Protein backbone atom coordinates (compact mmCIF):
# COMPACT_ATOMS: atom_id res chain seq x y z
CA UNK A 1 0.00 0.00 0.00
CA UNK A 2 1.32 3.39 -0.96
CA UNK A 3 2.05 5.20 2.35
CA UNK A 4 3.34 8.74 2.69
CA UNK A 5 3.86 11.07 5.61
CA UNK A 6 3.77 14.85 5.29
CA UNK A 7 5.11 17.01 8.10
CA UNK A 8 3.74 20.54 8.15
CA UNK A 9 4.44 23.45 10.48
CA UNK A 10 0.73 24.42 10.54
CA UNK A 11 -2.48 23.62 8.67
CA UNK A 12 -6.08 24.66 8.04
CA UNK A 13 -8.42 21.67 8.23
CA UNK A 14 -11.30 23.27 6.27
CA UNK A 15 -12.76 25.04 9.29
CA UNK A 16 -10.00 25.73 11.79
CA UNK A 17 -6.39 26.82 11.92
CA UNK A 18 -3.92 24.52 13.72
CA UNK A 19 -0.73 26.42 14.39
CA UNK A 20 0.90 24.71 17.36
CA UNK A 21 2.71 22.14 15.23
CA UNK A 22 4.63 20.48 13.74
CA UNK A 23 1.94 18.05 12.57
CA UNK A 24 2.29 14.73 10.80
CA UNK A 25 -0.28 13.75 8.20
CA UNK A 26 -0.23 10.08 7.24
CA UNK A 27 -1.82 9.05 3.95
CA UNK A 28 -2.27 5.41 2.98
CA UNK A 29 -3.62 4.48 -0.45
CA UNK A 30 -4.77 8.07 -1.00
CA UNK A 31 -6.78 8.24 2.26
CA UNK A 32 -5.71 10.35 5.26
CA UNK A 33 -5.29 7.80 8.06
CA UNK A 34 -3.92 10.04 10.81
CA UNK A 35 -3.26 13.70 11.60
CA UNK A 36 -1.36 14.27 14.82
CA UNK A 37 0.90 16.74 16.53
CA UNK A 38 4.58 15.87 16.42
CA UNK A 39 7.43 15.27 14.02
CA UNK A 40 7.97 12.06 12.05
CA UNK A 41 10.10 10.59 9.29
CA UNK A 42 8.50 12.33 6.34
CA UNK A 43 8.52 12.21 2.57
CA UNK A 44 7.63 15.88 2.41
CA UNK A 45 8.15 18.79 4.79
CA UNK A 46 6.14 21.92 4.12
CA UNK A 47 5.25 25.15 5.93
CA UNK A 48 1.48 24.93 5.44
CA UNK A 49 -1.25 22.52 4.26
CA UNK A 50 -4.94 23.13 3.49
CA UNK A 51 -7.69 21.46 1.42
CA UNK A 52 -7.65 22.00 -2.36
CA UNK A 53 -9.40 25.28 -3.19
CA UNK A 54 -12.86 25.70 -4.76
CA UNK A 55 -13.68 28.27 -7.47
CA UNK A 56 -17.47 28.65 -7.35
CA UNK A 57 -18.11 30.99 -10.27
CA UNK A 58 -16.08 31.20 -13.47
CA UNK A 59 -16.56 30.95 -17.22
CA UNK A 60 -13.86 28.57 -18.42
CA UNK A 61 -14.46 29.32 -22.11
CA UNK A 62 -13.56 33.00 -21.63
CA UNK A 63 -10.07 34.44 -21.22
CA UNK A 64 -10.30 37.22 -18.63
CA UNK A 65 -6.82 38.45 -19.54
CA UNK A 66 -7.98 39.58 -22.99
CA UNK A 67 -8.60 43.30 -22.51
CA UNK A 68 -9.31 44.28 -26.11
CA UNK A 69 -13.10 44.73 -26.24
CA UNK A 70 -13.20 44.15 -30.03
CA UNK A 71 -11.27 40.90 -29.72
CA UNK A 72 -13.53 39.72 -26.90
CA UNK A 73 -16.57 40.39 -29.05
CA UNK A 74 -15.09 38.64 -32.07
CA UNK A 75 -14.12 35.64 -29.92
CA UNK A 76 -17.80 34.89 -29.22
CA UNK A 77 -17.95 33.77 -32.87
CA UNK A 78 -14.81 31.58 -32.62
CA UNK A 79 -14.77 27.88 -33.50
CA UNK A 80 -15.54 25.24 -30.88
CA UNK A 81 -11.92 24.02 -31.10
CA UNK A 82 -10.64 27.49 -30.31
CA UNK A 83 -13.02 27.80 -27.36
CA UNK A 84 -12.07 24.33 -26.08
CA UNK A 85 -8.39 25.33 -26.22
CA UNK A 86 -9.16 28.44 -24.14
CA UNK A 87 -11.15 26.25 -21.71
CA UNK A 88 -8.28 23.78 -21.29
CA UNK A 89 -5.86 26.61 -20.63
CA UNK A 90 -8.29 28.02 -18.02
CA UNK A 91 -8.39 24.61 -16.30
CA UNK A 92 -4.57 24.62 -16.13
CA UNK A 93 -4.59 28.10 -14.61
CA UNK A 94 -7.07 26.94 -11.97
CA UNK A 95 -4.91 23.94 -11.13
CA UNK A 96 -1.76 26.04 -10.87
CA UNK A 97 -3.55 28.19 -8.28
CA UNK A 98 -4.32 25.14 -6.12
CA UNK A 99 -7.99 24.87 -7.22
CA UNK A 100 -9.24 21.27 -7.26
CA UNK A 101 -13.00 21.90 -7.66
CA UNK A 102 -14.59 24.34 -10.10
CA UNK A 103 -18.21 25.29 -10.68
CA UNK A 104 -18.54 26.80 -14.12
CA UNK A 105 -21.22 29.47 -14.51
CA UNK A 106 -22.30 28.59 -18.02
CA UNK A 107 -21.63 29.18 -21.69
CA UNK A 108 -23.86 29.06 -24.75
CA UNK A 109 -21.62 26.60 -26.60
CA UNK A 110 -21.55 23.86 -23.96
CA UNK A 111 -17.77 24.16 -23.58
CA UNK A 112 -18.17 23.56 -19.84
CA UNK A 113 -19.99 20.28 -20.49
CA UNK A 114 -17.35 19.15 -23.03
CA UNK A 115 -14.53 19.96 -20.62
CA UNK A 116 -16.31 17.97 -17.93
CA UNK A 117 -16.44 14.90 -20.15
CA UNK A 118 -12.73 15.30 -20.97
CA UNK A 119 -11.99 15.39 -17.24
CA UNK A 120 -14.05 12.25 -16.66
CA UNK A 121 -11.15 10.10 -17.85
CA UNK A 122 -8.59 11.41 -15.41
CA UNK A 123 -4.87 11.00 -15.63
CA UNK A 124 -2.92 12.45 -12.72
CA UNK A 125 -4.13 15.49 -10.83
CA UNK A 126 -7.00 17.28 -12.52
CA UNK A 127 -9.63 19.59 -11.10
CA UNK A 128 -13.19 18.35 -10.69
CA UNK A 129 -15.73 20.36 -12.64
CA UNK A 130 -19.39 21.04 -11.95
CA UNK A 131 -21.14 22.48 -14.94
CA UNK A 132 -24.60 23.83 -15.77
CA UNK A 133 -24.27 23.64 -19.56
CA UNK A 134 -26.32 26.69 -20.52
CA UNK A 135 -28.00 29.02 -18.08
CA UNK A 136 -31.66 30.16 -18.41
CA UNK A 137 -32.66 33.66 -19.43
CA UNK A 138 -35.85 35.38 -20.52
CA UNK A 139 -36.18 35.79 -24.29
CA UNK A 140 -34.41 38.95 -25.45
CA UNK A 141 -32.80 39.69 -22.10
CA UNK A 142 -29.20 39.84 -20.80
CA UNK A 143 -26.95 36.80 -21.07
CA UNK A 144 -26.84 35.71 -24.74
CA UNK A 145 -23.26 34.35 -24.38
CA UNK A 146 -24.20 31.94 -21.62
CA UNK A 147 -27.94 31.34 -21.51
CA UNK A 148 -30.73 29.74 -23.51
CA UNK A 149 -33.93 31.72 -23.96
CA UNK A 150 -37.23 30.71 -22.40
CA UNK A 151 -40.60 32.42 -22.67
CA UNK A 152 -43.39 30.90 -20.58
CA UNK A 153 -43.94 28.24 -17.91
CA UNK A 154 -44.01 25.38 -20.44
CA UNK A 155 -40.73 26.41 -22.03
CA UNK A 156 -39.13 26.85 -18.58
CA UNK A 157 -40.02 23.28 -17.61
CA UNK A 158 -39.10 21.70 -20.94
CA UNK A 159 -35.76 23.57 -21.13
CA UNK A 160 -34.75 22.55 -17.60
CA UNK A 161 -35.62 18.95 -18.51
CA UNK A 162 -33.37 19.21 -21.57
CA UNK A 163 -30.48 20.65 -19.55
CA UNK A 164 -30.75 18.27 -16.60
CA UNK A 165 -29.06 15.09 -17.95
CA UNK A 166 -25.65 16.79 -18.36
CA UNK A 167 -25.97 19.53 -15.73
CA UNK A 168 -24.81 19.41 -12.10
CA UNK A 169 -26.55 22.66 -11.19
CA UNK A 170 -29.05 25.00 -12.80
CA UNK A 171 -28.05 28.59 -13.37
CA UNK A 172 -30.69 31.25 -13.91
CA UNK A 173 -30.23 34.87 -14.92
CA UNK A 174 -32.67 36.68 -12.70
CA UNK A 175 -31.59 40.24 -13.48
CA UNK A 176 -29.43 42.19 -15.91
CA UNK A 177 -26.07 43.73 -15.10
CA UNK A 178 -24.94 46.91 -13.38
CA UNK A 179 -24.95 50.17 -15.32
CA UNK A 180 -21.58 51.42 -14.07
CA UNK A 181 -22.20 54.99 -15.26
CA UNK A 182 -25.55 55.32 -13.54
CA UNK A 183 -24.63 53.16 -10.55
CA UNK A 184 -27.83 51.10 -10.77
CA UNK A 185 -29.20 47.96 -12.44
CA UNK A 186 -29.83 47.79 -16.20
CA UNK A 187 -33.31 46.52 -17.01
CA UNK A 188 -35.80 44.95 -14.62
CA UNK A 189 -36.37 41.41 -13.47
CA UNK A 190 -36.09 38.62 -16.02
CA UNK A 191 -38.43 36.27 -14.13
CA UNK A 192 -41.37 36.93 -11.81
CA UNK A 193 -41.49 35.35 -8.35
CA UNK A 194 -43.93 32.76 -9.65
CA UNK A 195 -41.65 31.85 -12.57
CA UNK A 196 -38.58 31.72 -10.33
CA UNK A 197 -40.39 29.39 -7.93
CA UNK A 198 -41.24 27.16 -10.88
CA UNK A 199 -37.58 27.15 -11.95
CA UNK A 200 -36.37 26.21 -8.46
CA UNK A 201 -39.05 23.53 -8.02
CA UNK A 202 -38.48 21.97 -11.45
CA UNK A 203 -34.70 21.93 -10.95
CA UNK A 204 -35.03 20.32 -7.50
CA UNK A 205 -37.33 17.61 -8.84
CA UNK A 206 -34.54 16.78 -11.29
CA UNK A 207 -31.90 16.79 -8.54
CA UNK A 208 -30.30 20.11 -9.48
CA UNK A 209 -29.24 22.88 -7.12
CA UNK A 210 -29.99 26.39 -8.34
CA UNK A 211 -27.87 29.52 -8.50
CA UNK A 212 -29.02 32.90 -9.68
CA UNK A 213 -27.13 35.69 -11.38
CA UNK A 214 -28.78 38.48 -9.42
CA UNK A 215 -28.11 42.02 -8.24
CA UNK A 216 -30.35 44.86 -7.09
CA UNK A 217 -33.08 44.81 -4.45
CA UNK A 218 -35.90 43.74 -6.78
CA UNK A 219 -34.05 40.62 -7.93
CA UNK A 220 -32.66 39.84 -4.49
CA UNK A 221 -36.18 39.81 -3.00
CA UNK A 222 -37.39 37.37 -5.66
CA UNK A 223 -34.27 35.20 -5.19
CA UNK A 224 -34.75 34.80 -1.44
CA UNK A 225 -38.54 34.39 -1.69
CA UNK A 226 -38.14 31.66 -4.29
CA UNK A 227 -35.76 29.73 -2.02
CA UNK A 228 -32.95 29.62 -4.61
CA UNK A 229 -29.82 27.83 -3.31
CA UNK A 230 -27.26 30.53 -4.11
CA UNK A 231 -27.14 34.20 -5.05
CA UNK A 232 -24.28 35.13 -7.37
CA UNK A 233 -22.90 38.71 -7.41
CA UNK A 234 -25.61 40.18 -5.14
CA UNK A 235 -24.61 43.81 -5.58
CA UNK A 236 -26.76 46.43 -3.81
CA UNK A 237 -27.22 43.96 -0.94
CA UNK A 238 -29.21 44.97 2.16
CA UNK A 239 -29.45 43.78 5.77
CA UNK A 240 -33.05 42.65 5.23
CA UNK A 241 -31.96 40.32 2.39
CA UNK A 242 -29.01 38.98 4.38
CA UNK A 243 -31.26 38.13 7.35
CA UNK A 244 -33.56 36.18 5.03
CA UNK A 245 -30.55 34.41 3.47
CA UNK A 246 -29.21 33.45 6.89
CA UNK A 247 -32.65 32.10 7.88
CA UNK A 248 -32.98 29.99 4.74
CA UNK A 249 -29.32 29.01 4.43
CA UNK A 250 -29.03 30.66 1.00
CA UNK A 251 -25.40 31.01 -0.10
CA UNK A 252 -23.79 34.22 -1.36
CA UNK A 253 -21.05 34.27 -3.99
CA UNK A 254 -20.12 37.98 -3.98
CA UNK A 255 -17.73 38.12 -7.02
CA UNK A 256 -15.94 41.37 -6.18
CA UNK A 257 -13.33 40.89 -8.89
CA UNK A 258 -14.99 42.15 -12.11
CA UNK A 259 -16.30 45.33 -10.46
CA UNK A 260 -13.05 45.93 -8.60
CA UNK A 261 -11.21 45.67 -11.96
CA UNK A 262 -13.47 48.34 -13.47
CA UNK A 263 -12.75 50.55 -10.47
CA UNK A 264 -8.98 49.97 -10.60
CA UNK A 265 -8.63 50.44 -14.38
CA UNK A 266 -11.08 53.20 -15.39
CA UNK A 267 -8.88 54.12 -18.38
CA UNK A 268 -9.74 50.86 -20.18
CA UNK A 269 -13.47 51.53 -20.33
CA UNK A 270 -13.06 55.30 -20.36
CA UNK A 271 -14.81 55.87 -17.00
CA UNK A 272 -14.71 59.43 -15.65
CA UNK A 273 -14.11 60.44 -12.02
CA UNK A 274 -17.84 60.43 -11.29
CA UNK A 275 -18.25 56.83 -12.50
CA UNK A 276 -15.20 55.74 -10.50
CA UNK A 277 -16.72 57.32 -7.39
CA UNK A 278 -19.95 55.41 -8.11
CA UNK A 279 -17.99 52.15 -8.46
CA UNK A 280 -16.31 52.90 -5.13
CA UNK A 281 -19.73 53.30 -3.48
CA UNK A 282 -20.94 49.99 -4.94
CA UNK A 283 -17.79 48.21 -3.69
CA UNK A 284 -17.98 49.86 -0.26
CA UNK A 285 -21.58 48.70 0.09
CA UNK A 286 -20.48 45.20 -0.93
CA UNK A 287 -17.65 45.20 1.68
CA UNK A 288 -19.98 46.37 4.42
CA UNK A 289 -22.50 43.64 3.63
CA UNK A 290 -19.91 40.84 3.33
CA UNK A 291 -18.79 41.60 6.88
CA UNK A 292 -22.43 41.65 8.00
CA UNK A 293 -23.20 38.39 6.14
CA UNK A 294 -20.32 36.66 7.91
CA UNK A 295 -21.61 37.94 11.25
CA UNK A 296 -25.20 36.81 10.51
CA UNK A 297 -24.06 33.34 9.44
CA UNK A 298 -24.89 33.58 5.72
CA UNK A 299 -22.87 30.85 3.94
CA UNK A 300 -20.31 32.87 1.93
CA UNK A 301 -18.74 31.07 -1.01
CA UNK A 302 -15.75 32.35 -2.98
CA UNK A 303 -16.13 32.80 -6.72
CA UNK A 304 -14.24 35.27 -8.88
CA UNK A 305 -16.30 35.34 -12.11
CA UNK A 306 -12.98 34.58 -13.86
CA UNK A 307 -13.22 34.90 -17.62
CA UNK A 308 -14.98 38.24 -17.13
CA UNK A 309 -13.16 41.33 -18.34
CA UNK A 310 -9.92 41.68 -16.36
CA UNK A 311 -10.38 38.57 -14.19
CA UNK A 312 -7.83 35.80 -14.90
CA UNK A 313 -8.55 32.17 -14.04
CA UNK A 314 -6.82 30.91 -10.90
CA UNK A 315 -5.26 34.17 -9.77
CA UNK A 316 -8.70 35.78 -9.81
CA UNK A 317 -9.91 33.48 -7.03
CA UNK A 318 -6.99 34.44 -4.79
CA UNK A 319 -7.75 38.13 -5.47
CA UNK A 320 -11.34 37.42 -4.45
CA UNK A 321 -10.19 35.92 -1.15
CA UNK A 322 -8.08 39.01 -0.49
CA UNK A 323 -11.12 41.25 -1.15
CA UNK A 324 -13.20 39.20 1.29
CA UNK A 325 -10.52 39.53 3.95
CA UNK A 326 -10.20 43.28 3.37
CA UNK A 327 -13.97 43.52 3.77
CA UNK A 328 -13.65 42.14 7.29
CA UNK A 329 -13.95 38.34 7.08
CA UNK A 330 -11.50 36.43 9.30
CA UNK A 331 -8.84 34.32 7.53
CA UNK A 332 -10.56 31.14 8.77
CA UNK A 333 -13.87 32.23 7.22
CA UNK A 334 -12.15 33.34 4.02
CA UNK A 335 -10.44 29.95 3.64
CA UNK A 336 -13.63 28.06 4.54
CA UNK A 337 -15.47 29.99 1.78
CA UNK A 338 -13.10 28.41 -0.75
CA UNK A 339 -12.86 24.91 0.79
CA UNK A 340 -15.36 23.33 3.20
CA UNK A 341 -18.40 25.61 2.74
CA UNK A 342 -19.00 25.05 -1.00
CA UNK A 343 -18.23 21.32 -0.80
CA UNK A 344 -20.76 20.93 2.02
CA UNK A 345 -23.46 23.01 0.29
CA UNK A 346 -23.04 21.13 -2.99
CA UNK A 347 -22.95 17.68 -1.38
CA UNK A 348 -19.40 17.00 -2.64
CA UNK A 349 -16.87 14.59 -1.15
CA UNK A 350 -15.29 16.53 1.73
CA UNK A 351 -11.66 17.55 1.44
CA UNK A 352 -11.13 18.56 5.06
CA UNK A 353 -7.74 17.57 6.45
CA UNK A 354 -9.03 14.83 8.76
CA UNK A 355 -8.50 11.10 9.19
CA UNK A 356 -10.86 9.13 6.97
CA UNK A 357 -11.00 11.68 4.15
CA UNK A 358 -9.47 11.17 0.74
CA UNK A 359 -6.38 13.35 0.33
CA UNK A 360 -7.27 16.53 -1.57
CA UNK A 361 -4.60 18.88 -0.30
CA UNK A 362 -2.39 21.73 -1.31
CA UNK A 363 0.86 22.82 0.30
CA UNK A 364 1.93 26.45 0.55
CA UNK A 365 5.38 27.96 0.98
CA UNK A 366 4.09 30.08 3.87
CA UNK A 367 1.09 30.43 6.14
CA UNK A 368 -1.93 32.40 4.85
CA UNK A 369 -2.54 33.36 8.49
CA UNK A 370 0.77 35.25 8.49
CA UNK A 371 0.13 36.76 5.05
CA UNK A 372 -2.89 35.91 2.91
CA UNK A 373 -0.79 36.50 -0.22
CA UNK A 374 0.96 33.20 0.63
CA UNK A 375 -2.05 31.55 -1.07
CA UNK A 376 -0.23 32.42 -4.30
CA UNK A 377 2.74 30.21 -3.27
CA UNK A 378 1.35 26.74 -4.00
CA UNK A 379 4.10 24.08 -3.90
CA UNK A 380 2.07 21.04 -4.81
CA UNK A 381 -1.39 19.56 -5.05
CA UNK A 382 -2.10 16.03 -3.81
CA UNK A 383 -5.25 14.17 -4.89
CA UNK A 384 -5.48 10.64 -3.53
CA UNK A 385 -2.14 9.11 -4.55
CA UNK A 386 -1.45 11.61 -7.36
CA UNK A 387 0.92 14.47 -6.72
CA UNK A 388 1.26 17.54 -8.90
CA UNK A 389 4.43 19.42 -7.98
CA UNK A 390 4.18 23.09 -8.83
CA UNK A 391 7.89 23.74 -8.63
CA UNK A 392 10.82 21.66 -9.72
CA UNK A 393 12.65 21.54 -6.38
CA UNK A 394 9.65 19.95 -4.69
CA UNK A 395 9.24 17.49 -7.54
CA UNK A 396 12.78 16.28 -6.95
CA UNK A 397 12.27 15.82 -3.23
CA UNK A 398 9.18 13.66 -3.79
CA UNK A 399 9.54 9.96 -3.04
CA UNK A 400 6.70 7.55 -2.55
CA UNK A 401 6.77 4.32 -0.58
ZN1 LIG B 1 -20.53 35.03 -14.31
Image (spheres, rainbow, N blue to C red):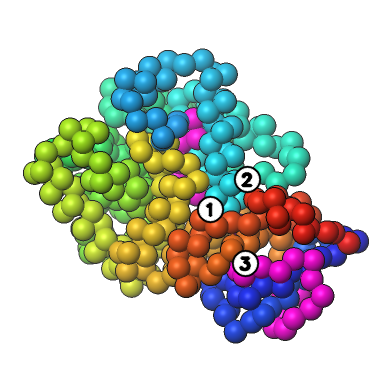
Q: Is residue 297 above or below residue 384?
A: below
* In the displayed structure image, the side of residue 115 where residue 193 appears, left or right: left
Q: Label 2 crowding class (10 Å Cα cut-off): few <14, some 14-19, many 20+?
A: many
The residues tagged by marks 3 and 1 sit, at their Cα atoms, a distance apart of 15 Å
The x and y percentages for residue 142 are: 29, 29
Magenta stretch encompasses residue 178: no
Q: Is residue 255 above or below residue 321?
A: above
* In the displayed structure image, the side of residue 75 where residue 132 appears, left or right: right
- At 47% from the left edge and 48% from the top edge, which residue is drawn? 315
Q: Is residue 347 visible?
A: no
Q: Is residue 37 visible?
A: yes
The x and y percentages for residue 14 are: 56, 68
Magenta stretch encompasses residue 47: yes
SS at mark 3 in the image: strand
- At 50% from the left edge and 35% from the top edge, which residue is drawn? 60
Q: Is residue 93 above or below residue 353?
A: above
In the picture, the disc for residue 127 is: 2
* Residue 267 placement: quadrant: top left
The x and y percentages for residue 375 are: 51, 59
Whether tag 3 and tag 1 are in contact, CB under 8 A, the answer is: no
> Which residue has dot 3 on it?
49
Could you tell me which quadrant the C terminus lies in? bottom right
Q: Is mark 3 within 8 Å of ligand 1?
A: no
Residues in magenta, as a range: 34-61
In the picture, the disc for residue 135 is: none
* Dot placed on the residue nearer the N-terminal end, 2 or 1: 1
In the picture, the disc for residue 54 is: 1
Q: Residue furthest front?
A: 393
In this orientation, which residue lies closer to the viewer: 110 or 397? 397
Amino acid sequence: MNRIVIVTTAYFDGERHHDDGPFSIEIVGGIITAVHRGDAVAEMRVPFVLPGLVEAHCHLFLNGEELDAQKRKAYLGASLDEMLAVGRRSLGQNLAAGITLIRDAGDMHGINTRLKSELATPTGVLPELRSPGRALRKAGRYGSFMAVEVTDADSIVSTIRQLAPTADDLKVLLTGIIDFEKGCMKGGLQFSLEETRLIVRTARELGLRTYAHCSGIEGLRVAVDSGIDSIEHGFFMTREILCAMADKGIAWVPTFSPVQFQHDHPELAGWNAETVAGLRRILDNHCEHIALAAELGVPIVAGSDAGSYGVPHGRGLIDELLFQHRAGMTVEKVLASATSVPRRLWGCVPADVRAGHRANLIALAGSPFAELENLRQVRWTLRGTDLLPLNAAQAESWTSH
